[in-house]
Amino acid sequence: MNTNLRRALGAAVVAALGLPVLAACGGSGGSGEADGGKTVTLVSHDSFVVSDGVLKDFEKESGYTVKVIKSGDAGSAVNQAILSKSHPQGDVFFGVDNTLLSRALDQDLFTPYEAKGLDRVPKNLQADAARHRVTPVDTGDICVNYDRAYFADHKLAPPQSLDDLIKPEYKNLLVTENAATSSPGLAFQLATAAKYGDDGWQDYWKKLKANGVEVVSGWEQAYSERFSGSAGGKKAKGDKPLVVSYASSPPAEVMGVKPEPKEAPTGVATGTCFQQTEFAGLLKGAKNTKGGQALIDFLLGRRFQEDMPLQMFVRPVNQDAALPELFTKYGAKVTDPHTLDPEKIAKNREQWVKAWSSIVLK
């Protein structure tokens, strides 16, 4: 798999919690307090990427220098923010998604701030609209992807729904990630909980296991090694034509390919998707509160929102932001993704993962 694809699709991250080794990048300088408030520090996951020109425009217009601290994957970054909340690493945290949001809010990580431009964000994406402790920045969908060539060669229609995946014609074709160690794996499990309810999702997974689903530790192994439709999959001779990945995987597969193909080599089963939204928040105890507020406004503004899709392969939440042609031409349109309230996820996540593990991994 090419580096751009791996980096981009890594935005919805492997969620194994652990203490990260911190890496700083971006603008130079110390804390906002030490240099008179001219540095604003953003803490995020390893997949945070922004074009240099876009970041420099913000620095020029705002007068702040941006320092970025990357704290591993999303789960690790949230964990580190909780452990260091009495002495926060920075001013703004970006990258907590709806599967981890309630944990962060319960730990009182954020100071409320109503960002400029929030009126241009759909209400259904504003998970903390009453208090504005976090601001939605991007959204994306975890979905089953399929290898178009495989299904064409076998004269078999690709699956489109969760129900399809347990049908005999798709036996032994799907690889997914471990829900206990992977963010996409967890999201796929949450999709089944949303679809079949508290009483039905376990029975569904028993049927999926009987139909030969393969489980691997994380996205990189599933997509790059086991999936037959990715660039990495072809090199590794992956034999699974179905994989749990992202709705943005097809545009990522096409990025940089010359000549540009008529369609992406992979497709998306749009009835299998779970919607993820990533949020930013002003860290409680931030040394540069005004700079942090300006940075959150920037993350929600059109300049950053329109740069973001081809940097992190997620979709903007600002309704005024235009999608790049790569997304409109090759991306899947997911009109009705599965969703769950973050509080319901927080209440049930641990017991659901334990139940899932006992069904699928034993």
Image (spheres, grey):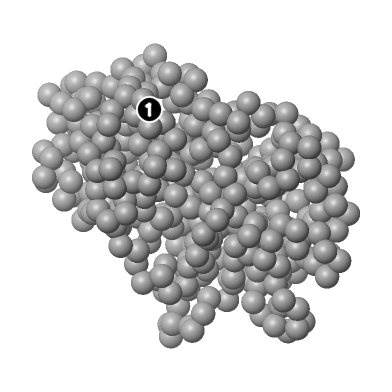
> Residue 263 appears at what percent x and percent y?
51, 80
User: Depth check: 40 or 337 in front?
Assistant: 337
Most extreme residue toward the top is 86
Instruction: Relative to 303, say whether 65 is above or below.
Output: above
Left or right of 346? Residue 227 is right
Residue 17, by quadrant, is top right
At 11% across and 46% down in the image, what residue appears?
60
> Residue 49 appears at what percent x and percent y?
36, 50
For residue 50, say whether it is visible: no
> Residue 7 appears at what percent x and percent y?
47, 55
**Dot 1 corresponds to which residue?**
130
Identity of the amino acid at label 1?
A: Ala
Total residue callouts: 1
Left or right of 215? Residue 47 is left
Residue 212, by quadrant, is bottom right
Location of the C terminus (image quadrant) = top right
User: Depth check: 237 or 181 in front?
Assistant: 181
Residue 169, by quadrant, is bottom right
User: Depth check: 21 or 231 in front?
Assistant: 231
Location of the N terminus (image quadrant) = bottom right
At 19% across and 21% down in the image, what residue appears?
33
> Residue 325 appears at what percent x and percent y?
36, 72
User: Depth check: 23 or 296 in front?
Assistant: 296
Instruction: Relative to 100, say whether 194 is above or below.
Output: below
For residue 356, say whether it is visible: yes
At 78% across and 42% down in the image, what residue appears?
200
Q: Which SS class for mark 1?
A: loop
Instruction: Relative to 285, say whether 354 is above or below.
Output: below
At 42% across and 67% down in the image, what residue appears?
327
Mark 1 closeness class: few <14, some 14–19, many ≥20 residues within 10 Å: few
